[in-house]
Amino acid sequence: MISFTWLPEAGLAHNAKDIPLPADWNEVTGYIKITSDNIIKIINPNPEFGQNVMTSLPMMVAEELDVEWKKVVVEMGPHDSVKLGPQFTGGSNSMRMYWRPLREAGAAARNMLMQAAAQTWGVPIEEITTKAGMLYHEKTGKSGKYGEFASKAAGIAIPKGVKLKDVKNFKIVRSSQKNVESSKIVSGKPLFGLDYTHEGMLIAMIEHPPAFGMKLKTFDASQSLKMPGIKDVFSMKLYEDGFEQGGFDTRTFNDLLVVVGKTTWEVMQARKKLVVQWEPAGEIKEKIGGRGGAREVIVPGELETSSAQYAKMQEYANKPGQVVRKDGDPETAFKNAAQVIERTYNAPFLAHNCMEPINFFAHVTDEKALVAGPLQAPGWSEPTLAKLLNLPADKIEIQMTRMGGGFGRRAYGHYLYEAAVISKKVKAPIKLIYTREDDMTYGIYRPMYTATYRAALDANKNLIAFSVKGGGIPEHAIHANRFPAGAVDNYLAETWQIPSNITIGAFRAPRSNFNAAAEQSFLDELAEAMGKDPIDFRLELLKRAKEKPVGKNNEYDADRYAGVLKLLKEKSGWGKPENNKYHRGVAAYFCHNSYAGHVVDMVIRNGKPYVERVYSAMDCGIVINPDAATNMVEGAVIDGIGNAFYGKLSHKEGKAEQNNFNRYRVIRHSEVPKKIEVYFVQNDLDPTGLGEPPFPPVFGAVANALYKGTNKRYYNQPFLDPATQNNNTNTNKKTF
Amino acid sequence: MIKLNINKKPIEVDVDPETPLLWVLRDTIGLVGTKYGCGMAQCGACVVHLNGVAVRSCVTKVSRAVGQKVVTIEGLSENNDHPLQKAWMELDVPQCGYCQSGQIMSAAVLLNENKNPTDQDINNAMEGNICRCGTYLRIHNAIKLAAEIQRKDSK
Amino acid sequence: MVMKFRSSAFAHLHIFKLANLIFYKLINMSSGKTYFMHTKTFAVISTILSVIVLMSFAIKNEPLNNDPNVVAKDSVASVKAFMDVYKVLMSPRCMNCHPAGDIPLNGDDGHLHSMNPQRGKDGKGISAMKCTTCHQPTNVEGLNQPPGHPDWHLPPANMKMVFEGRTANQLAKQLVNPKTNGNKTIKQLIAHADDGLVKKGWDPGEGRTLPPMSHAEFKQAWITWLNTGAYAPSSK
């Protein structure tokens, strides 16, 4: 059964002309529907936020199913964990998670069709072949469209363990296919959560406290209620006291001061007429669930200011942290070193700032709920939603619209819950909308980080010890088992954290997005102190990690990591004199199962640094859709440059100092490289992700290029904000 | 009642004349191709044309559109075949796609006024349109391709 | 030399008269009776005197305004008034739209207008970022929203009327020179104080600091400066 509610007409994948919807779909495995006319529809299980899973995942099905890609229709699936798998978009996991299941579904469906044909024709299945949506029995010259056998196939039990194609024989996967939604995007079709409409739908907005650590005291809505189009103004709690939150149930403000009206503008205007008293919330006790049971967390009440937070972090950075990994005897090695290099790196909160502001639709009655909107992980939010609405999961229908950006922000379902509880209260379908200001000041930021790196060199400038002490508000960024752990005899990793009422969440390559910047800058500085080329230095360390690894659980494949660096060295013409006019910075990193590296070529123009070219090398196993993959890497490079140069969310007494793009600077058109050349290591390994891995090393490469261009090391992000450059704590911590 | 002309069609709407054109298009008329990104003319997601001139509809009152020909992304072409739309699809520009209506509508004004834009022309013209996914390089190349398509089409 | 510039000629005449008067008084004081110097001698002496006086004025304050409407030239009052004018014109609400480059400035700190909208040939912007793309006929309500006026624009490319980076001396000269002030006469300059865009400086929208004096005070200073000879403060 398929319900086509508001979703735009399914379009042909290849040329995307709209077709009238046929009625007789036969479901052959949960991912495939075929009509008698041989129209093949493939369901995309994972929500789409620009990583093009909507094209790449169906490609895998189509490949094994053996159909013509240009005849395939793609549709976004509903939330259905039974039929469609985990359906979680995040962690650069989509390709990895669905590589087997989707190929198996395609292969199984093909097998079911072959069985159906074999039965119909009364021939053994071994004699049946397929090609591009057709079945053949060569011996008798019989042939037929998949569609002719679809209804029969739908009744056959889904076989397990069907043999998959050899990855070397792919016709669809590993070739570039065009984005199946392109034509809808460029013609302004309704696609996003904000575009969703429903009969009788009202608009709701929430008036949030002006600062973290504040809560609602009293409000007077008398003027607002008089405004045109306004239905109601009320306050309610999101979670009841003592509610046990799941890992992705983070929310900043529990009191919801809600304005409900007919249109967006009317509600925006009515909000301006609210007279509200806010008060400090003080310390709050929260219950957070997890493996091993629920634990109580104390959320501090202080209204925080960035400069004070920064100072506090430096204090903690100078104290011992919690040891999370120790190899050999780093203390002694540092004591006996001929030279110790120590550097401290800092980075601010970042706001995700997806172009589509937070929003969600909900239509909740006593019996059931329909919710629709931009959401990365419906499965993670469903249990809490069911609890809040007191409805069983099978009475809750979750539809995922296309998302105008995710970056991790939309893994946190608080806005889904808010929409749902509001709808339940007003007994009407509502769409909850956050303005840009609401969105940018709500929190769930990338944390604030500090990390201190130390390296010990012996008299021959050999690296004998390496340590990192990393912390953050409210959590640290350290991955203790990542490179260069495993490559250095004496290694120490410590962490610390400072709690805060500023909420945080996953931001494109969580932790790694800072780690890579700090660590890769430090390795650059280390290489310089040792008189080594930065790439060769890393390759030496990786060689050591491969041949004589130190310690256990080293969380990377040294060969693959080195492979990316070697590819990068080759393709960027590293060391070639014709590239000397550029200020070159290099960085590489492993995260989310893939390996990435960049060479950033910077120039200084009118005193301003400008990245003119970037070379990128990736190892993500089999590349499913090369052009889409290239687009992802380009995007990560540009996003990385922008955040490294400008990204900053600062606070004054709990209030976000940036609430729109006039203050929160993002990279713009004229600032992007003229050329980004992306190379993939060719291998047949199972695919891993690309959404996050290319992002972290960009920061490090940019920092290293800046050094070459300005003769100054950049330790504090954002790099082009003069205020943060004045906070350099390394001025006196030269090499000693 | 306010009389408008949107994508060559006359339409009457019953809204406060102070309402921004963006919300009249989206909420009242149901043309959701024009997007809300910031509400203060900083991001360009809301760009539409008034008699061929770009305006940011999030700050433009609907009263300003009276007597003007309004063109939104939905009306840029009859068959999704404006040179920019063709170029965008050819080069697979979008990632999430949310900013692209505004990008295309801004680029359309550039190409109307400048048949052979240089890199600098494109940079100057497009600086007001934000893309969080970082498709700027593809946008840049697609505008160049669109200019080429436009030149070929006009021969 | 004397007849080259209109302004110096008038000054010369003024000084000639003054010198004549002083000389006459001196002569009377010394001799107690009316004494008319030989015209030729008198002319020579007064010319020398006036040249000396003129030269000394050239070093200090320059009269730039020879408009017959001028009430009475008063270099001291003129310069004093201009210093007030200068304060206003160099404040963000005025200077932001009179930048040295081709991108307007924003905010009280005069940072580059985000998105780098370009001046364009006519000062009205280019392409999809013409001024009127965002700047409406009236201010958009709300903090940091675009201020508005039906004719929002920068000075055109061939008459940039830059304030940013100008000294008081430079700006004064620029303002009265028709070649650099948009072809305005003194009369038009006076009227300009009530130009719609000029007045916007005092109705800039929420979150923007007003100029350092009221429009009425500015207008007073502006007209005073012009009417007393539009003297430019010394370049020292």
Image (spheres, coloured by chain):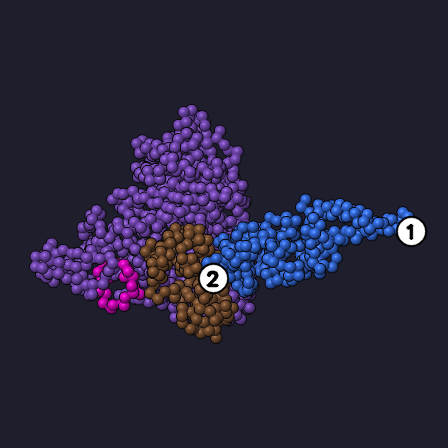
Chain colours: A purple, B brown, C blue
Label 1 crowd (10 A; few <14 / some 14-19 / many >=20):
few
Under mark 2, the amino acid is Arg
Q: Secondary structure at mark 2?
A: strand
Residue at 24% x, 57% y: name it. Answer: A69
How far, Cα to Cα, is label 2 from label 1? Answer: 83 Å
Residue at 28% x, 60% y: name it. Answer: A15
Residue at 52% x, 66% y: name it. Answer: A270
Q: How many discs appear?
A: 2
Q: Nearer the viewer, residue A364 or C66?
A: C66
Q: Nearer the viewer, mark 2 or mark 1?
A: 1
- Where is the N terminus of chain A found, in terms of image quarters? bottom left
Residue at 35% x, 45% y: name it. Answer: A677
Circle 1 residue = C33
- Most extreme residue toward the left, as rendered? A140
In x, y percent, where is residue A157? 18, 59
Question: Which residues are drawn in magenta?
Answer: A9-35
| Residue B46 placement, left or right of A273 | left
The chain carrying label 2 is: B
